[in-house]
Image (cartoon, grey):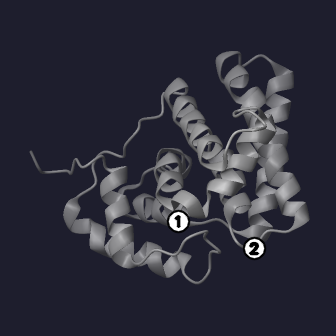
Amino acid sequence: MDALTHAVEAFIGRSTTPYTRKMARQAVQLIHDNLLEAYECGGNMRARRNMLSAAYKAGVAFTRSYVGYVHAIAHSLGGRYGIPHGLANAIILPHMLRAYGEAAAPKLADLARMAGIAPANALDNVAAEAFIDWVDRMNAALGIPKYVTGIRRSDIPQMAAHADAEANPLYPVPLLMDRLELERMYEVVAGGMFEGEN
């Protein structure tokens, strides 16, 4: 799911190239077709080889086209609480994709149609939502929680400031958010439940 985050953030950003788009698409297709098989049947060398290829292709895409707010938030959560980076990315990804809304919908729809997640004739908003729903289902199948637990509300302003400084102007995100909007994203990622509160 970390590799999927790399591919998706590289693809939906605003500094892609034909090559990075190709690599990201191939990574998403490979992940769609192989991740559950590799997870459920670890001895399947074909699925594992394909996932290694997916991770490489996603890496090529994001090292040239950068990432976005998923990574910026994940980095702050890792730095503050020691949350593993890939886990944080996986949890944050569907929440952030929904927050991007129409700004990312056409590109998410492209990925959904390409991978067979949505019909070829699906409208952009329908196909984009199907893609995000697929990410949710993948997380659930892999035992990845929907929310990050242990976030302290009092830490959010500083983490949001760090995420804001990291992402803007470095990352070519589909939709710029200000610090208050980013603070709201931490609340979404926490599921509205904060450490030390009832």
Q: Is residue 140 left or right of residue 195?
A: right
> Tag 2, which secondary structure?
loop
Which quadrant: the C terminus?
top left
Dot 1 crowding, Cα within 10 Å, few <14, some 14–19, many 20+: many
Which label was assigned to residue 69? 1
In-front residue for pair 78/5: 5
Instruction: Name the residue rendered at 65%, 65% in the picture.
Output: 67
Which quadrant: the N terminus?
top right
CA gap, disc 2 to disc 1? Answer: 15 Å
Instruction: Name the residue rendered at 62%, 59% in the picture.
Output: 104
Please state the total of marks drawn on the protein image: 2
Residue 57's spot in the image, x, y percent?
Answer: 83, 50
Q: Name the residue under label 2.
A: 15
Instruction: Name the residue rendered at 30%, 57% in the picture.
Output: 187
Q: What residue type is labelled 2?
A: Ser
Residue 46's spot in the image, x, y percent?
Answer: 87, 23
In-front residue for pair 107/47: 107
Residue 79's spot in the image, x, y percent?
Answer: 43, 64
Asked if the residue at tag 1 contacts the one at tag 2, i.e. Cβ–Cβ closer than 8 Å, the answer is no
Q: Give the farthest residue toward the left.
A: 198
Does 72 sit above or below residue 164?
above
Does 143 sit above or below residue 132?
above
Q: Which amino acid does label 1 sit on?
A: Tyr
Which label was assigned to residue 2? none
